[in-house]
Image (spheres, rainbow, N blue to C red):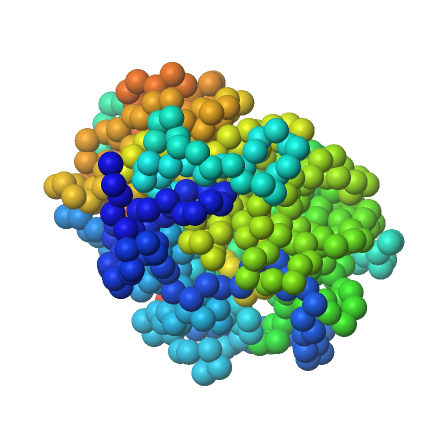
Amino acid sequence: MSQPPSQQPPQGGFGAPQEPPQDQPPAPAQPPQAPVGPPPTPPPSGPAYGYPQTPPAPQPGYGYPQAPGQAPGEAPGPYGQQPSGPYGQQPGPYGQPGPGGYGQPAPGPYGQPTQPGYGYPQQQYPGVPAPGGSGGSGGPFKGKTGVLAAAAVAVVLLVGAGAWYVVSDSGDDPKKPVAGPSEDAKGSEAPSASPSVDEGDGTGGGRETDDDLNAGRKPGEAKVAWLQKNEVDLPRNGGEIRGPWFVGDTVVTALYRGISGYSVADGKKKWTVALPADICATPNTTSPDGKIVIGIQNGTTDRSTCSVMQMIDLNTGKAGWKSEVKKSGAFDLISDIGLAISGNTVTAGRTSYSSAYRVSDGKQLFGTPTGNCRTFAFAGGPKLIAAANCRNDDVDNPQHQLQELDPVTGKAKWTYQPPRGWEIKKTYSVSPLVVSLENKKKKQWSVAAFTDNGKLRSQMSPAKGDLVTANCGGLLSIFGQQLEGCSGVAADASTLYMATKTDTTGSARTNKVVAFDLNTGKPKWTVPAPAERTVSPIGMEGGKVLLYAEPRYDKPGAILTIPPTGGSTSVLLQHPEGTNRIENSLFGGLNTVYRDGRSFILPKRISGSDDGEMEQATALVFSK
């Protein structure tokens, strides 16, 4: 059966043909054999070797006094979706608009937001001055990072044009593509500690469990364990809520220039560490003994960069060592760092240089590897995964490599090279290892699974017509990159679970969950969301898939489960109708965690437009 021009399979390569998401305007007409193309192709994520760079201006010192607030900018709604359908979100309490109430970046094809500085037109948000205009310098969007204004990236994979292109999984010649039809379609400086620590007074703004938020709770509904309101005087552009991290009976979140620990049971604040500059990088995980290393700006001016590492013990709320990642040679771009923790090792990845340090004392363990390939990003957790860019004579046809490293020595346990042109973008899971890749030149995406010894295990091949998505949003920098940061996906040893793109063709928004066999890449089963609801995977619990059923204007959210064999959804924790308006008010995308019988609902960003009010919800927690 012939395919429309926009769905013709590519002439070789790693991945499958793509088309823009259904909610995008149609692309300009293309010649019959050309795929639909996005805006001009941005440069590869890694460094372009062999091209001299102008050294940046000297950077200001760490600990500059606070500057005025930044210009506003908001992130898109969850999973890169534009609000659509008849169920528009209603404005919530605490002065917050509902999801989508702020200008969203206009995504280009494949769910990617257009990025100024890469040949794309710049997206402006209502009330946001253009870069270089007036507006303060105290928020996270300054200098290079200000150009991107908290764009959230949603990875979208479309397969169904009748062919699936893979590389050899034998490991003998990973550079050689094999095409065929799918059956189913040195030591560091002495560290220092300078942040101030507030032990907390035991009240901390947490809400009591006998609050009237539980008045009128219906049978079968969860109770509100606590509601946390914002206490931070934010700049005008607001701030990103990072975390949560769990250490014992403490849940920790970070916002703007502080990181705080709260009681899991009732939300009472245990401690706060105040920081001298904006938080700009955080890892997904902590060390096994509950320590974390976060990135903060090295000053508070427009020319500050994300280069300072600060260790904090989340058990006690005590700040430990602090060290700045220094420039390494004339061609080292001063780019923002990305952090990842595996065991007692924290890695800092930048454009073309990387380094690793001991979490406990800050001692450097290893640096950028010698040779032709430079590591630029990491993912942590049970394994330390690294992405590297290898020098070649064609910047439009990059050569990346994927590795698992020993977290103490930095020695590679294995190395895998995708075909030329394919860039490693994100990890959806570290164990088992599932990675997304992109070929910008061919305008293709792929999601690939790997074995424990680094062999290509499979590539995901959805059923015809299905678009599956992952929310890989968060703050972006022009140069820096992180392999971590994706949500809306879950995995166990044999299966990857993803949600499809929201279907808005009916009377209400809805979607499905697809389970992929990691050994074959083929769908095992597909389960629709409950009627007129949208869901996203958030993890695993007792062998079952955990889903968050997103709230509607007239229905609260819920935590659902699906058996690993498929079937229908079951309600694990039904959020109460009495707090539906609050749950709906958490805009800028949600970070949802289910743990020990409680669901934690946190917005990814909060507004700073009403500096005097500060009546915004930063965490809503339900329990059985």
360 left or right of 511 in image: right
Q: Is residue 396 visible?
A: yes
The spot of residue 85 in percent (x, y) is: 17, 48
User: At 25% across and 62% down in the image, what residue appears?
Assistant: 29
User: At 38% across and 26% down in the image, what residue appears?
Assistant: 183
345 left or right of 166 in image: right
User: At 55% across and 53% down in the image, what residue appears?
Assistant: 421
The spot of residue 178 in percent (x, y) is: 51, 36
Question: Against 362, is 247 above or below?
Answer: above
Q: Is residue 280 visible?
A: no
Q: What is the number of callouts on the image?
A: 0
The spot of residue 55 in percent (x, y) is: 70, 76
User: At 81% across and 49% down in the image, what residue appears?
Assistant: 366
44 left or right of 558 in image: right
Instruction: Give the camera-side residue of 10 and 612.
Output: 10
Instruction: Give the camera-side residue of 321 and 330.
Output: 330
Instruction: Give the camera-side residue of 594 and 175.
Output: 175
Question: Against 19, is 2 above or below?
Answer: above
The spot of residue 114 in percent (x, y) is: 40, 64
The quarter of the displayed image where residue 26 is located: bottom left
The quarter of the displayed image where residue 503 is located: top left
Quarter of the C terminus within the rendering:
top left
Instruction: Give the camera-side residue of 84 and 180.
Output: 180
579 left or right of 319 in image: left
Quarter of the N terminus within the rendering:
top left
